Structures are given as C-alpha cells and as structure tokens.
Amino acid sequence: MFQSANNVMVMADVSADQRGAVSGLLGLSRNIGLISGASVMGAVFSAGVGSTAIEEAAEAAIVDGLRITFMLGGLSILIALWLTRRLASVHV
C-alpha cells in the first residue's frame, strides 16, 4: 500500500529524461530492503535457536527462535506505525 503511492509521488516530481534512473533507484532500494530484512530476521532466528545447525536444535529451541523473531518483527511494525503517525502529523 505504501510503495505504490510513494513511487507515484516520487516519479511525478522527476523530469521525463530522469525517470528511468529514478525508477531503477527505487527498485534498487526496494530490493536492498527486502534482502537486508530477510538476512536480519534469519540471523535473529538463528541466534534465538542458539545452534548453528537447525537439525541439532530441540523443538523448544526452534519455538523460542520463532517467538523472538516474530516479536522483533511485530515490534518493528509498531515502531514503523508510530514513526509514520509522528511524521504525518509534522508534515500536515
């Protein structure tokens, strides 16, 4: 919901001869965000499990790793919502 509207707003302010470069940069930033987010959450899960090999981890450790990962994901969503609300009230 955010990316489409944001990309349209950004592209509306760009001159016609720069749209290709800006579109490429928007795609690059999106992909970097996806890759880094997946890497960080994988590292959090691995740290929560406490073992380098998932096959060796007990079921309780896997559940703990998932719980920590989802709690961090939920916390990051709450922080993003708070920042969005705070920044929206500043610019309106």
Image (cartoon, rainbow, N blue to C red):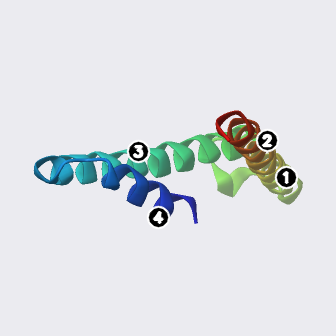
Q: Which residue is mark 1?
A: 67
Kindly report the distance in space between the C-alpha atoms of the residues bearing marks 3 and 4: 17 Å
Q: At label 3, which amino acid type do we have? A: Ile
Q: Vertical placement of 42 versus 91: above or below?
A: below
11 horizontally vs 55: left or right: left
Mark 4: give few (<14), some (14-19) or many (20+) Cα within 10 Å: few
Q: At label 1, which amino acid type do we have? A: Arg
Q: Which circle, 3 or 2, is nearer the viewer?
A: 2
Residue 25: x percent and y percent?
A: 28, 45
Foreground of the two, 52 or 66: 66
What residue is shown at x 85% (from left), y 57% (from top)?
63
Mark 1: give few (<14), some (14-19) or many (20+) Cα within 10 Å: some
Kindly identify which numbered label has been placed on residue 82: 2
What residue is shown at x 38% (from left), y 45% (from top)?
29
23 horizontally vs 35: left or right: left
Number of callouts in the render? 4
Quadrant of the image containing the C terminus: top right
Could you tell which of marks 4 and 2 lies nearer the N-terminus?
4
87 horizontally vs 24: left or right: right
Q: Which circle, 3 or 4, is nearer the viewer?
A: 4
Could you tell which of marks 3 and 2 lies nearer the N-terminus?
3
Q: Which circle, 2 or 1, is nearer the viewer?
A: 2
Callout 1 touching callout 3 (CB < 8 Å): no
In the structure shown, which secondary structural element does the residue marked by tag 2 occupy?
A: helix
Callout 4 touching callout 2 (CB < 8 Å): no
Callout 1 touching callout 4 (CB < 8 Å): no
In the structure shown, which secondary structural element does the residue marked by tag 1 occupy?
A: helix
Could you tell which of marks 2 and 1 lies nearer the N-terminus?
1
Could you tell which of marks 1 and 3 lies nearer the N-terminus?
3
Callout 3 touching callout 4 (CB < 8 Å): no
Q: Which circle, 1 or 4, is nearer the viewer?
A: 4
Kindly report the distance in space between the C-alpha atoms of the residues bearing marks 2 and 1: 22 Å
